[in-house]
Image (cartoon, rainbow, N blue to C red):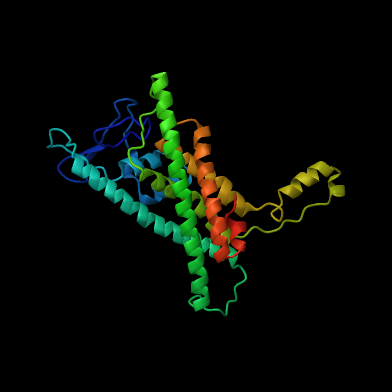
Amino acid sequence: MPICTTCTRWSSHLYTVYESASNLRLERCSNCHAFVDPYIEYDDLILLIDLILLKSGVYRHLLFNRGAKPRLATEASPKDDDGRRKRGENSRWLLVLHLGSILIFVDAFNRWCHLNPSQSVDLSPWSGFTIFNFSRIFIGCFAETVAFHCGVAAAYSVVLKMITLIEKLRQRHTSNIVLSSYSLIPLTLFYSSLTKLFLSFLLTIWRPSRSELLSPTAWNAPKLSNFLNMLDDSQLDIGWIVRNILGGISAGFGLRVILDCHPVFIMLVIFCGSVAKTVMAVLVSQWVGEAWLGYSLL
């Protein structure tokens, strides 16, 4: 069942279609009186930009409302078909496989560019060595992704049971959103990884350049000079910050959309997933190479 992208209240339908598909009327939420889901009229480019900007409304649209059937004006009441829900669940898992394969390929390409920055231009990109090297990195990215998602799902189920128990003891309910399907977890993580992959791709094209700073004597302030040296591109690993810090923040933000709880619980879930990912990175590095650890470890 779709939800309101503003207040997360459940709604029977998102919009009503009249005589033609282009003649429709958006439904208003009975709780906040805003449009239930204005994203159904937005282009895919707007959805992508809002995903990169980590807007909660687009997460709710893609996770809960995408593909929801409209209410026909000639229909007396919307039908609650269990078979339709099952088909929606199967289509969500297919979307996870489709989106996951694309994003893992993009992640593998970014890592391959970072791990092979000085490849000779005379070497064909379709040579056996290049394909084998890229295949190892792709398998490593796949293994890390599976480990991270499994760790997050396991920790998520434990946290969800804890929150349910606490709410029963306090006899109150804090959120309208519940985890109705575990397919929401990998789909949320893949959507939230777009921010990290987008910035990592920009770092692949425009690599950080070293900046020349003035000497401490020119500043006449050693502490200020040391602080500025720490912010220098030669001392600061921007790629590590994007992959781990920003990647963890975006993943935690996405998980809070499907489980509105205290950020501490979300941090624990992300930490458990990161531990599983780190263990897998250590195992994969024995086959891919030791340079893999510098890119993967937290």
Q: Nearer the viewer, residue 161 or 129?
A: 161
- Residue 268 position (above or below residue 100): above
User: Where in the figure is residue 61, as x and y percent of width and height?
Assistant: 35, 41
Question: With 165 as the anchor, is 78 left or right in this view?
Answer: left
User: Where in the figure is residue 57, as x and y percent of width and height?
Assistant: 40, 38
Q: Nearer the viewer, residue 225 or 101?
A: 101
Residue at (42%, 34%) from the top-left corner? 160
User: Where in the figure is residue 18, as x and y percent of width and height?
Assistant: 17, 40
Quadrant of image for the N terminus: top left
Residue at (62%, 57%) from the top-left corner? 294
Residue at (39%, 23%) from the top-left corner? 168
- Residue 97 position (above or below residue 248): below
Question: With 176 as the anchor, is 249 left or right in this view?
Answer: right
Q: Can the viewer see residue 247?
A: no
- Residue 96 position (above or below residue 174): below
Q: Can the viewer see residue 153?
A: yes
Badge count: 0
Question: With 37 as the anchor, is 166 left or right in this view?
Answer: right
Q: Nearer the viewer, residue 54 or 247?
A: 247
Which quadrant of the figure has residue 159?
Answer: top left
Farthest residue, direction bottom: 122
Residue at (52%, 76%) from the top-left corner? 129
Question: With 226 as the anchor, is 5 left or right in this view?
Answer: left
User: Where in the figure is residue 102, as x and y percent of width and height?
Assistant: 41, 59
- Residue 205 position (above or below residue 33): below
